[in-house]
Amino acid sequence: MTGPLLEVEELRVGFSSDRGVVQAVEDVSLELDEGELVCIVGESGCGKSVTALTIMGLTRSPTTRIEGSVRYEGSELLDAPESQLRAVRGPGIAIVFQEPVTSLNPVQRVGPQIAEQIRAHTTLDKAETRQQVIESMRRLGIPQPEQRWYAYPHELSGGMCQRVMIAMAMSCSPRLLIADECTTALDVTIQAQILLQLRSLCDDHGIGVLLITHDLGVVAEVADRVVVLYNGRVVEQGTVRSIFEDPQHPYTWGLLGSMPRLDRPRREQLLTIPGAPPEPGTAGGGCSFLARCPHAFDRCLEEPPLAPVPGASARESARCWLTPDERRHLRMVGGDIGLAPAGDIG
Ligand SMILES: Nc1ncnc2c1ncn2[C@@H]1O[C@H](COP(=O)(O)OP(=O)(O)OP(=O)(O)O)[C@@H](O)[C@H]1O
Ligand SMILES: [Mg+2]
């Protein structure tokens, strides 16, 4: 195959209700190649889950307005018939939802739930399928998988359900796995195991993984590339190296500044971004980070485009009017960019 496995272009998703339209996604573009692990990061409510669900065709409804383009292996999914989407879900794109308990069937034992998925997409017989399910539960660190086969979802902890969901998604051998906060509820050791597994899906099996997280530690651990979302928009994207070593957008500086680091005195360690993100679609004109940006100037009253970072690789871009030199200078003189220490904010 030539071209990316997944291409999202200028995606917009708005939900209408009696109280008006919630523009959950304003402008999201991203690409993902085979064997690549791309992380989407951003604060709660910035549109990560809506982006993931829309890629899978799961936000379609008469009250949802979806614009832009989502191409999987070159075919457009946004206006594809439901039958085509069904054929893509599972063996093509699989998703692990953020809310594992609500996405498992509460009245069916978990083993058969995973088995059903596998049998829908393979020619394995019953015994082989059971063997594969138990194997995939074991690989994900589910203790005593033979007994767990018979458990109902409510008999398992949240973290255990999450692992069942991941086992279910992986069992169909998808080409693209979308994992929405799939390790958030887990102990750090299990989280590390699962991240390693996701990484090996990319490296050993050429699967593309789109991992949604608000945890930059997770990003540093496994990502090839990073897409930073703010208020429904991509504000920056780049390689994991460029994001950590030469971040371009003041919002990314803020995210990095709020990450614990051993090389800073503890008192000064955690910085926060003053203010809160605007409600979706209410940012008004101009840059959506304007109200919280310590470096805003006149030009920011006009919304900046997502523009390539000069001199960087093709997939590095930022939505900010500051020039790369200004950004570098500000980061140098501002240490961690003029954001307030966490303790100073009410
Ligand atoms: N079905 C819906 N109808 C109306 N608004 C919605 C719907 N789904 C999501 N939203 C709104 O869209 C915005 C983006 O939601 P989304 O779930 O994508 O956030 P998120 O980035 O995944 O956040 P979190 O980190 O908390 O999971 C939020 O303001 C949310 O309230
Ligand atoms: Mg979410």
Image (cartoon, rainbow, N blue to C red):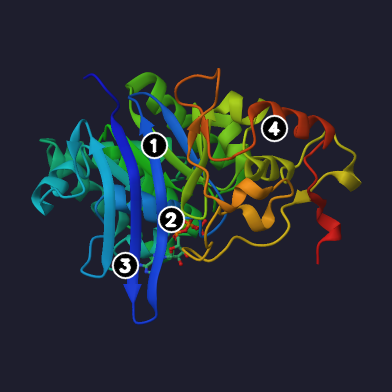
Does mark 1's beta carbon lie closer than 8 Å to ligand 1?
no
Secondary structure beneath disc 4? Answer: helix
Split into 4 quadrants, where in the image is the N terminus? top left
Marks 1 and 3, how far apart at CA: 35 Å
Q: CA distance from mark 3 to mark 2?
A: 16 Å
**Residue type indicated by callout 3:** Pro
**Residue 23 percent location from the top left of the image:** 40, 63
Kind of residue indicated by mark 2:
Gln
Q: CA distance from mark 1 to mark 4?
A: 23 Å
Instruction: Determine the CA span between mark 4 and mark 2.
Output: 35 Å
Q: Quadrant for residue 330, please give it.
A: top right
Find residue 118 and report its horizontal and vertical position in percent.
20, 42
How far apart marks 2 and 1 lie (CA) works out to 20 Å
Residue carrying label 3: 106
| Figure check: 125 above or below 244 | below
Residue at image location 22% in from the left, 43% down from the top: 90
Q: Which mark is residue 327?
A: 4
Residue named by callout 2: 98
Circles 1 and 4, Cβ within 8 Å, touching? The answer is no
Q: Which residue is mark 1?
A: 30
Q: Amino acid at mark 1?
A: Leu
Give how far apart the Cα atoms at labels 3 and 4 are: 51 Å
Residue 117 or residue 127, whichever sits in front: 117
Q: Earlier in the sequence, mark 2 or mark 1?
A: 1
For marks 4 and 2, give the one nearer the viewer.
4
For ligand 2, tell me if the residue under mark 2 lies within 8 Å.
Answer: yes
The picture places residue 173, in percent across and down from the top left corner, at 26, 33
* Foreground disc of the pair 1, 4: 4
* Front in this rendered view, residue 60 or 159: 60
Front-lying residue, 211 or 294 = 294
Single out the mark in the foreground, 3 or 4. 4
Q: Name the residue rendered at 79%, 39% in the picture.
A: 336
